Image (cartoon, helix red, strand yellow):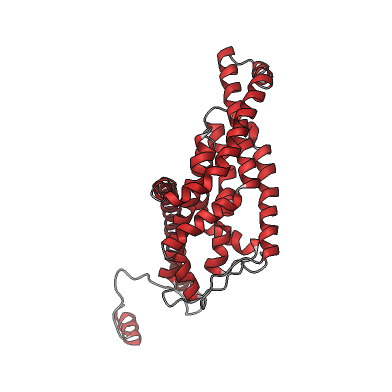
């Protein structure tokens, strides 16, 4: 009995440990020795899958944290925009004409809607078997939202250029336009005239139907108003930043700009929703917050510029193209 064990030790160069699995039978036949390689091959794969799943979850968490951070600072810029506007008296004169026009439109629309639209809307809520006091309260809220929507449309159609002028003034004071001109060889990139007009018409055709189609959401107290500004706000923020995206990355096409918006969606959605919510406030919204939101958009644009500069310190211009097949 001892001799076979000695021969086995000599052939392997070492004595087998008691913890090692013993193989029986011939070299090519048995089950134990054939199964060991499978276990050794499978093990790294399992560990790799586990590591990959950990990596994916870590990436997802980082992206979530980044979105939350962008949402926080975008909300903060709506407040900073107020202080920026109030500290610059030369910008106040730019809102005189919008103020006069929206004052007239607010008085007229309030008179017409409270006189002719309040009672029918209250009866509409009564058909839903809501308590009477809630029906009248919701009818008043709907009238105020409708008045604000009328002012938003007037500002969008007639005075969009005023917000652009305010943004450029703030960016010029902060030296952002001068830096962009230096990086571009002495001039700031501008949108071509026909594309600028087409973009303005495109935003108008996109925003107006969405504002009207989602208007029934305001019938839901609080939650409906929040949902309405969130659904419409990101496009409003995109429209404010559209001209700057051309200066920043030469994003002349809407498809190129869309992928930038998608990459910073938390910032665009939060800033746009907060800005729209402020502009819905009767009288003060179209008079003051219309201009302060333009200042806030300039501060948000400044952050986008500093973010790009930190990623490309040597002033390298990455191609502003959409992913393959998405243009």
Is residue 130 visible in the rendered structure shown here?
yes
Q: Residue at x 58, y 48 (%)?
A: 236
Q: Residue at x 54, y 56 (%)?
A: 165
Q: Is residue 114 above or below residue 165?
A: above
In the image, residue 82 lies at what x, y percent? 42, 45
Report the front residue among 100 and 243. 100
Which quadrant: the C terminus?
Answer: bottom right
Q: Is residue 151 above or below residue 108?
A: below
In the image, residue 117 lies at what x, y percent? 67, 22
Q: How many marks?
A: 0
Q: Residue at x 61, y 64 (%)?
A: 256
Q: Residue at x 45, y 70 (%)?
A: 179
In the image, residue 209 lies at what x, y percent? 70, 42
- In the rendered image, the residue lying farthest to the top is 132
Is residue 39 visible in the rendered structure shown here?
no
Which quadrant: the N terminus?
Answer: bottom left
Quarter of image, res 19: bottom left
In the image, residue 285 lies at what x, y percent? 51, 38
Does 71 sit left or right of 257 as displayed? left
Q: Is residue 294 above or below residue 248?
A: above
């Amino acid at each position: 009995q001892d001799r076979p064990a000695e021969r086995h030790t000599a052939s392997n160069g070492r004595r087998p440990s008691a913890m090692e699995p013993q193989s029986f039978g011939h070299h090519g036949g048995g089950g134990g020795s054939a199964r060991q390689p499978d276990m050794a091959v499978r093990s790294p794969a399992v560990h790799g899958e586990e590591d990959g799943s950990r990596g994916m979850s870590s990436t997802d968490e980082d992206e979530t944290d980044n979105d939350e951070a962008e949402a926080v600072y975008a909300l903060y810029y709506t407040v900073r925009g107020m202080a920026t506007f109030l500290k610059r008296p030369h910008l106040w004169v730019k809102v005189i004409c919008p103020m006069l026009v929206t004052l007239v439109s607010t008085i007229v629309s309030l008179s017409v809607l409270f006189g002719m639209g309040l009672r029918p809307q209250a009866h509409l809520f009564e058909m839903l078997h809501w308590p009477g006091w809630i029906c009248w309260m919701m009818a008043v809220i709907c009238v105020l939202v409708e008045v604000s929507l009328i002012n938003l449309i007037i500002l969008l159609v007639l005075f969009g250029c005023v917000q652009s002028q305010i943004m450029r003034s703030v960016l010029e004071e902060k030296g952002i336009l001068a830096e962009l001109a230096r990086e571009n060889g002495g001039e700031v990139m501008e949108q071509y005239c026909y594309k600028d007009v087409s973009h303005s018409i495109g935003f108008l055709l996109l925003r107006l139907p969405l504002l009207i189609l989602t208007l029934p959401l305001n019938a839901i107290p609080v939650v409906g108003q929040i949902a309405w500004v969130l659904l419409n706000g990101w496009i409003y923020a995109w429209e404010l930043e559209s001209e700057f995206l051309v200066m920043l990355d030469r994003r002349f096409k809407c498809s190129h700009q869309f992928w930038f918006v998608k990459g910073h969606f938390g910032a665009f959605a939060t800033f746009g929703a907060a800005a729209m919510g402020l502009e819905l406030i009767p009288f003060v919204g179209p008079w003051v917050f219309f201009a302060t939101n333009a200042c806030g958009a300039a501060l948000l644009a400044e952050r986008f510029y500093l973010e790009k500069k930190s990623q490309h310190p040597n002033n390298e211009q990455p191609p502003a193209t959409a992913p393959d097949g998405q243009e």
